Image (tube, rainbow, N blue to C red):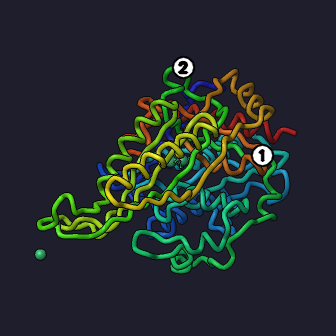
Amino acid sequence: MSPATDAPVRARFEAVWRELAVIGDGGAAGYHRFAWTAVDLELREWFAGQAALRGMPCERDRNGNLWAWWGTPGPGAVVTGSHLDSVPGGGAYDGPLGVVSAFLAVDLLRERGVTPSRPIAVVDFADEEGARFGVACVGSRLLTGVLDPGDARALRDADGITLAEAMSAAGADPGAIGRDDEALSRIGAFVELHIEQGRGLVDLGAPVGVAAAIWPHGRWRCTFHGEADHAGTTRLADRRDPMQPFASTVLAARDVAGHLGALATFGKVHVTPNGTNAIPSRVDAWLDARAPDEATVHETVSAITRAAEKAAAGHGVRVEVHPESYTPLVEFGVPLRDRLAATLGGAPVLPTGAGHDAGILSSHAPTAMLFVRNPTGTSHSPAEHAGTGDCVTGVTALADVLEDLTRT
Ligand code: HGY
Ligand code: MN
Ligand code: MN
Ligand code: MN
């Protein structure tokens, strides 16, 4: 892996990065790049433009994923890329770094005079973060058939717009979504480059690493049903205030996770009717739970559920906990994983608690991930950042990996 001193790659990276970074840029508020919005369509145009610049035919599959091809689309392709959407207030690198690096790695291979023995595809998976419709990795889950098309079409955003309506409004056919065996049959291997979301590489002093595993993780909707009433005239003893058991559950989640070595987060909550002077009738809150192993995830969610039920009973409130999406433990296959680490001169191999499309693809094709060092570890925040030098090292590493995987 050559050191990141290749000025042309650095200059090219900075130029492409500047062009992409302005799309949907919310400044200090971060990015709000949500699926099937005007910003998403701008990102799709950017992707198609990058493909056209390289003479790479670009197609949108039935699930909204974009594929740019070097070579005739066909079985055994080496696919690389990531996603362009973001969480609310997201950073610039989570997703886009993998897509930009993929296009620049193609450039580098062409400069090296490489003629791949197999097709190479750059992919942008639709709606990886699930920020608008609440389910993560929609594009890759539909592609692989792990998300039911009917359930997907019915997903609603905060304004009540369904995924089907949003796709139609963006000129895509929601009736076509579903498992895509032809697209799947083309994937000989998938390699996703991603900014590391954590400090593993910082602590190891390495610019690039290889993913060992993705922690099992999921999302559960907790609904606390209480009774609306007047904030100024209802005695405390007469209240059935859902906010009370919700607050206790948030604190309990932290304790439970701490005891079990898990991670539990309530990052999204809807209060109904959400009025300053109205005791809520209901609180919907989303739990994100993750742990190194499946048993601990389920034990964490069960313990938090018990805490919620106990707190709710104490306030005459009813609580329901619904699983919304779940990704089992992903252990990246040793052959491909170790082949990447060897190609990169013994790059470190480390796990992650962050979900990725690679996690969904891993049960359908040989899959691996490359991580690029994140100096602070911060992600899902406007403060997310990776050094340009490390990004260029990532591009070079991805090119080395693609060259190796398409040599024979
Ligand atoms: O939630 C995750 O871990 C990923 O960023 N979608
Ligand atoms: Mn993310
Ligand atoms: Mn991501
Ligand atoms: Mn009044």
Query: What amino acid does circle 2 point to?
Result: Leu
For the view shown, which residue lies furthest in the right direction? 408
Q: Residue at label 2?
A: 204
Residue 274, x across and y down, in percent: 26, 66
Q: Residue at label 1?
A: 189
Q: Residue at x 61, y 42 (%)?
A: 216
Question: How many residues crowd around disc 2 within 10 Å: few (fewer than 14), some, or many (20 or more)?
Answer: few
Query: Which one is nearer the viewer's eye here, 108 or 358?
Result: 358
Q: Residue at x 24, y 62 (%)?
A: 239
Q: As displayed, is residue 44 above or below residue 117?
A: below
Query: What amino acid does circle 1 point to?
Result: Ala
Rendered-image quadrant of the N terminus: top right
Residue 280, x across and y down, in percent: 28, 65
Question: How many residues crowd around disc 1 within 10 Å: few (fewer than 14), some, or many (20 or more)?
Answer: many
Circles 2 and 1, Cβ within 8 Å, touching? The answer is no
- Tell me the CA gap for discs 2 and 1: 27 Å
SS of the residue under disc 1 = strand
**For the image shown, how many numbered marks are present on the structure?**
2
Q: Residue at x 17, y 69 (%)?
A: 230
Q: Earlier in the sequence, mark 2 or mark 1?
A: 1
Q: As displayed, is residue 169 above or below residue 74?
A: below
Residue 275, x across and y down, in percent: 22, 67
Residue 397, x across and y down, in percent: 65, 33
Rendered-image quadrant of the C terminus: top right
SS of the residue under disc 2 = helix
Residue 56 visible in image: no
Q: Is residue 344 left or right of residue 8?
A: right
Q: As displayed, is residue 358 above or below residue 221?
A: above
